[in-house]
Image (cartoon, coloured by chain):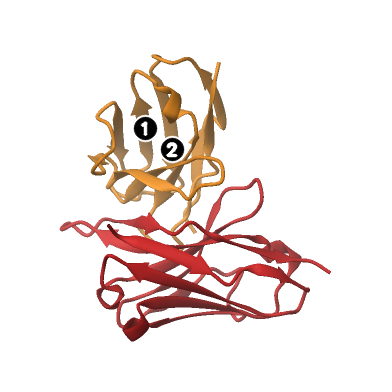
Amino acid sequence: DIQMTQSPSSLSASVGDRVTITCRASQSVSTYLNWYQQKPGKAPKVLIYAASSLQSGVPARVSGSGSGTDFTLTISGLQPEDFATYYCQQTYSRPHTFGQGTKLEIK
Amino acid sequence: EMQLVESGGGLVQPGGSLRLSCVASGFTLSTSSMNWVRQAPGKGLEWVSYISDSSNTIYYADSVKGRFTISRDNAENSLYLQMNSLRAEDTAVYYCAKKSRSARGENWFDPWGQGTLVTVSS
């Protein structure tokens, strides 16, 4: 199985800040990498698919990059609604594993 | 708007069985591959099972293989997860999620249902 490792596991930031979350795969997943946002008590929602494609309706302050084994999710100009938990997921091979999550909290 | 609604969760004793359902609206389930994903309380996401649009291809996570069975009824626009021999570690919110795919073949899960809670306890 491909292991997905996110860093950091938690992050404190202020409204207006720029944050970056990293996801590393144990082997190459090409660009088969997705990012999800999850708020407490809610289902995950896709933000970025195929490493860098912005899902319709997601604000342009969210961006993704990377290929192979190293990926980043960047959120610029943090808004109150961005404080949530973020997960990366590879869909290159089964099982389609997720990272352990990064909890973004308000400082 | 595409929507998925799960049902069937509840409290069950260890060794018991439960059948989850997921009803789709706003899109045709018969042309969609589908997944089940679970999340134990306070934990991360774990992919559980996949079924192709024609049911010809099915996969399971090792943790549920031999105990869970995924199926679908395209006429009813419904997806199912039959869970047998349940264990305490199966306690989780279970989500159904549609596989979406790009022209290049990359794929992701969207949309997701709201989830249904399964609690395995005596």
User: Does A11 appear above or below A96?
Assistant: above
User: Does A15 appear above or below B108?
Assistant: above
Q: Quadrant of residue B42?
A: top right
Q: Chain of mark 1?
A: A
Q: Quadrant of residue B113?
A: bottom left
Q: Which element is circle 1 on?
A: strand
Return the x and y of residue A61 as percentages of the image width and height.
Answer: 29, 26
Position of B11 compared to B76: left or right? Answer: right
| Amino acid type for the residue under numbered disc 1 | Leu
Contact, mark 2 vs mark 1 (Cβ under 8 Å) = yes
Residue drawn at (43%, 32%) of the image: A22
Return the x and y of residue B11 as percentages of the image width and height.
Answer: 72, 68
Position of A20 compared to A11: left or right? Answer: left
Q: Quadrant of the C terminus of chain A?
A: top right
Q: Nearer the viewer, residue A98 or B41?
A: B41
Q: Which element is circle 2 on?
A: strand
Whether residue B56 is visible to the viewer of this picture, yes or no, is no
Residue drawn at (30%, 60%) of the image: B2
Q: Earlier in the sequence, mark 2 or mark 1?
A: 2
User: Drawn colour of chain A?
Assistant: orange
Return the x and y of residue A95 as percentages of the image width and height.
Answer: 46, 63
Indicate which label's residue lies in the foreground, 2 or 1: 1
Can you identify the residue that label 2 sits on?
A23
Q: In the picture, which chain is red?
A: B
* Marks 2/1: CA–CA distance: 8 Å
Mark linked to residue A73: 1
Return the x and y of residue A19 as percentages of the image width and height.
Answer: 41, 21
| Amino acid type for the residue under numbered disc 2 | Cys
Marks 2 and 1 belong to one chain? yes
Q: Quadrant of residue B97?
A: bottom left
Position of A100 compared to B54: left or right? Answer: right
